[in-house]
Image (cartoon, helix red, strand yellow):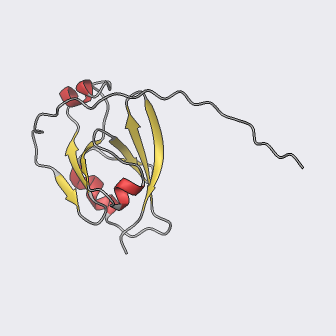
Amino acid sequence: MNCSAPKLMIPVATAELPNQAPAARSPSKDDGLGLELRPLTPDLAERLGLAPTTHGVVVSAVRPGSAAAEAGLRPGDVLTSIDRNPVTNPREASRALGSPRAGGHLVLIQRGDGSAFVVLPAAP
């Protein structure tokens, strides 16, 4: 029996993350997931190739082997929503990611011209 699934071609663009200047506000660390978040300023959005009006928080660091790394997050990703709720600052994002939720948190990330959903484990 020959079972072949239809193939879906998805164009992917890759680019290097530009050197980041320190953000105007302090970063937020979520040690449980292994990521560090920074506010997304209009200048930083532009340097990441995003519209200056893009809202969210920027992943500035990901600890190797962490839950965030296993989910595929990497520096330069922009978290625009968590559990379908928009995020606008690191504190708000950390609070949402630190709350308990069966099945984990659905996170919408923007990376360059594309976006994708990833699931991050919830706090116990």
For image coordinates 40% across by 66% down, the residue present is: 122
Picture layout, residue 42 above or below residue 100 = above
Quadrant where the C terminus is found in the figure: bottom left
For image coordinates 23% across by 25% down, the residue present is: 47
For image coordinates 16% across by 34% down, the residue present is: 20
Query: How far across and how far down the image is residue 40, in percent?
Result: 23, 37
* Residue placed furthest toward the right: 1
* Residue placed furthest toward the bottom: 124
Q: How many marks?
A: 0
Query: How far across and how far down the image is residue 103, in percent?
Result: 50, 66
Picture layout, residue 102 above or below residue 67 = below
In this image, 12 relative to 109: left or right? right
Choose top left, top right, bottom left or bottom right for residue 83: bottom left
Query: How far across and how far down the image is residue 22, in percent?
Result: 10, 38
In this image, 116 relative to 99: left or right? right
Query: How far across and how far down the image is residue 70, in percent?
Result: 40, 56
For image coordinates 29% across by 56% down, the residue present is: 64
Picture layout, residue 35 above or below residue 22 = below
Choose top left, top right, bottom left or bottom right for residue 91: bottom left
